[in-house]
Image (spheres, rainbow, N blue to C red):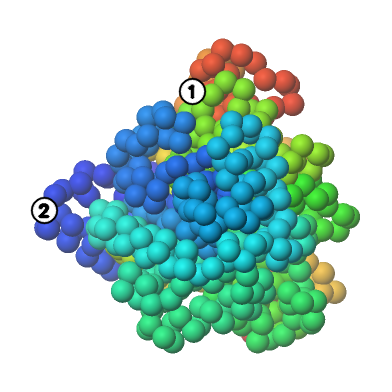
Amino acid sequence: MLLGASILLTTACSDREATEGTGSAARTAEAAESEFPERAYFGDTHVHTGWSADAGLDGAVTSPEDAFRLASGEEVTSNTGQKVRLKRPLDWMVITDHSDGMGVISEIQAGNPEMIADPFVKRLYEGMKSDDEALRKALTLELIDRQSSNALPKVLMDPKWMASAWRRTIEIADRYNRPGRFTAFIGYEWTVNEGGGNNLHRNVVFRDGADRAGQVLPLTTFQTEDPEGLWAWMEAYEQKTGGRVLAIPHNGNLSNGRMFEETRFDGSPMTQAYATSRQKWEPLFEVSQIKGQSESHPSLSPTDEFASWDLWDRGNLNGVLKKPGMVRTEYWREALKIGLRLEGQLGTNPFKYGANAGTDTHTGLTTVEEDNFWGKFKTVEPRKGRWQTVVTGGEGPGGYRGWEQAAAGTMGVWAKANTREALWDAMQRRETFATTGPRISVRFFGGYDFTDADTGSGLVRAGYTKGVPMGGDLGRAPRGKSPTFLIAAMKDPEGANLDRVQVIKGWVDAEGKTREKIFDVAWSGNRKPGADGRLPPVGNTVDLKTARYENSIGAPELVVRWTDPEFDPARRAVYYVRVLEIPTPRWTNYDEARFGYRMPDNVSRVHQERAFTSPIWYRPS
């Protein structure tokens, strides 16, 4: 449907020659800001190296320098001694080593006498020297449990270890930051594992360089586990330094109901001040990563035929099983709807989250290509049999095995230049989209005056001058008008064709109940919806024996103007776009072809990669 808009969707990744120049003129050209954001810059907001305690305990030896080298296009040596290189460099990246225990892992590895005088730390030291994978996994679970119950030895919490590691981290980021060519952000992860593994983690991303970030030390959960404490730390940082910082929550799917609960951390009622702070400091939410997806769940979206993908829905990080009702407050789509209702009660939407994706690799290797996936930990870097290795949650029913890892994810940012400032500003205004890995590009604008003519070469200008981009708000509709959206999606230039484009709408009805509906708005081929309103599948060209597929189905581009046919001007609503590729081989199928064996039938081998835009909110008041 409606093809021919590749000019609208320029991507930096497919035009690398424009950024590889060595002279200052080439760098200045890419760093100069354009009138409108014209490029999608792709990167990873969630990378751990061997400097993170759990990664180092698992045997990772990569440094932040190794991670930036790989991301910017160089070949590096993996934690298992193998050579690895990305097929395409990233445009930007954030290293987010854990603040808890920052700087201690290298001291333990070296057998620091002050460290290993503690019995628990001595066991960590001995485990790191052991080849026993089960022992190291058990120690990692114990480390998480001790951290979440504030029972770590004091020697691990001494800030002197962090100060040195933080200084080296931010100096490395500054050294690899090359405006216009590759953006290296400073960041860290604040890792709350409340209640024995309930994931309430946040990645903290600085707009600034080492001159400002070096004036503080990262916040740890030893100081506070309350997100309001993190927001206070962020505010204090900005007041002290004049800098800017934002936070990105992730893995609501492993929070056992705590990520989007409708109370404050201590269980007290949510207030407008709380909602305002959460919206201010946390503009994005990580929808997809190696540890599964947090978009939606089949039990929450029973009419969504594409809701059952990359599910990690049995328990939390330590394998503590979920109880009935927990799933409802773990997923992004449900939170977007709950946020509309809470805005009506509090005056502010606490869950006004744009779309983010990152890997959460603990190898220092940001790899999302299905045929070049290096896993979450050293123990699941490429090798025969890695599909059955326990990666998270232990050996019990709440644990997750290697084959359940997702080779995901990536975030696209519509920014005016490839610089820290331009990219960070776009993240803050939520002009972002998440993908499960491919560099699909998608535009999404909302307004009241778009015409079919706006789907042509002037789409971008029309979107910005006559409406709002993804992440924006639409005010009360003029009498007799409904929200109209311009949507343009382009396949990854080196990837699979597109199946369809969907608009996912959430709203609050007259009784105060949250609702959702999925609209197929553009698709490939001559398919027509059936009597049930569903669009027939696009087909499947995957050859499981060879792990290959053909782009003989699907479309390279899908562009459409769509108007909400069920719009009620009195009701708050939220809209986001989901783009689906045709079926392609999953990394597990590539492993089968590479290593010459077959996994059990319950292992997923084929999937449909996808992208999600940040929403556009309709606010009648």
Residue 55 x, y percent position in the rendering: 54, 46
* Mark 2: amino acid: Gly
Quarter holding residue 326: bottom right
Quarter holding residue 530: top right
Q: Residue at x 68, y 37 (%)?
A: 135
Q: Is residue 102 visible?
A: yes
Element on which disc 1 rests: loop
Q: Residue at x 36, y 45 (%)?
A: 66
- Depth check, mark 2 against mark 1: the one in front is 2
* Mark 1: amino acid: Glu
In which quadrant of the rendered image does the C terminus lie? bottom right
Q: Which mark is residue 466?
A: none
- Look at mark 2 in the image and give the residue it sits on: 23
Q: Is residue 398 above or below residue 78?
A: below
Q: Is residue 115 above or below residue 222?
A: above
CA neighbours of label 2 inside 10 A, class few (<14), some (14 to 19), many (20+): few
CA neighbours of label 1 inside 10 A, class few (<14), some (14 to 19), many (20+): some
Residue 559 x, y percent position in the rendering: 47, 49
**Left or right, 88 with reference to 115:** left
Residue 381 x, y percent position in the rendering: 52, 32
Q: Which of the two labelled residues, at mark 2 and mark 1, occupies the earlier sequence position? A: 2
Q: Residue at x 59, y 31 (%)?
A: 131
User: Residue most toward the right?
Assistant: 324
Q: Is residue 615 visible?
A: no
Image label count: 2
Element on which disc 2 rests: loop
Residue 374 x, y percent position in the rendering: 50, 34
- Look at mark 1 in the image and give the residue it sits on: 550
Evaluate if marks 2 and 1 touch, with contact meaning CB atoms under 8 Å apart.
no
**Left or right, 210 with reference to 358:** left
